[in-house]
Amino acid sequence: MKLRYSIALSLPLASATAMGAELALKLEVPQLNVAEYHRPYIAAWLENADQKVVANLAVLYDTKKKDNAGTKWLKDVRQWWRKSGRDVEMPMDGVSGATRAPGEQSLTFPGAKATLDKLPAGQYTLVVEAAREAGGREAVKVPLQWPPKSAQNVSGQGKEELGAVVVQLKP
């Protein structure tokens, strides 16, 4: 973990433009008509062109379980777990939070707060992965350019565990 983050944090600033840049994420958690419904665990992160995690943006899981027992099931968010999750300690300040109810959810990541201002300019992929107990798992990938040169929306679409995933970029 430390090596991965020390490399990411030692990268030169992309430009003064990235300092004020912001990334907002709107994602739809569908209401599924099943006998046993559990809120999904969701992870959102940015990958570089080499598919390496450069920023964990959000990890939403059952934070209210006694003795932090909700972390036991984070490994079910498989792609995130294999690429980054097993190397981080939960809860992560400013990244982890409670699971979300069905409906449209919004998350905002100001550049400096999410360490996005330290990313070099280039192509990235925002990945949102959801896994649900007694349910399925799904990942949606949305390619984007960082830092954004103009305000824009880019999107992807899930099929079962996720609905629409919209990334709003602001310079």
Image: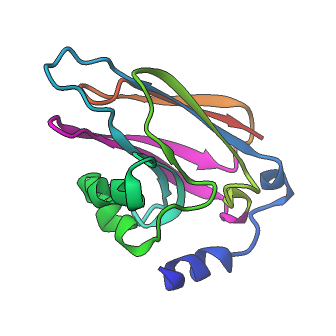
Query: Hey, which quadrant is residue 80 in on the image?
Result: bottom left
For the residue pair 26 and 68, the one nearer the viewer reads as 68
The foreground one among 142 and 95 is 95
User: In the rendered view, does 1 fall on the left or right side of 14?
Assistant: left
Give x and y (percent) for residue 149.
Answer: 74, 42
Q: Is residue 132 magenta?
A: yes
Q: On screen, 32 above or below 61?
A: above
Say if 136 sits above or below 157 in the image.
below
In the rendered view, does 94 fall on the left or right side of 60?
right
Q: In the rendered view, would you say 95 is above or below 131?
A: below
Residue at 76% x, 68% y: name it. 13
Q: Residue at x 29, y 60 (%)?
A: 72
Which residue lies most toward the bottom here? 3
Measuring 38% from the left and 65% from the top, which residue is drawn there? 85
List x then y, in percent, for residue 18: 77, 53
Residue found at x 59% / y 28%: 153
Q: Is residue 43 visible?
A: no
Residue 10's x, y, as percent?
68, 80
Would you say residue 146 sits in the magenta stretch? yes
Name the foreground residue: 74 vs 119: 74
* Residue that extends furthest to the top in the rendered view of this protein: 33
The way the protein has been coloured in the rendering is rainbow
Q: Which residues are magenta?
A: 118-147
Judged from this view, the residue extending furthest toward the right is: 16
Q: How many marks?
A: 0
- Quadrant that contains the C terminus: top right
Query: Most prominent secondary structure in the magenta stretch?
Result: strand
Looking at the image, can residue 132 be seen?
Answer: yes
In the rendered image, residue 90, in percent from the top left (x then y), is placed at 47, 64
Say whether residue 113 is left or right of residue 157. right
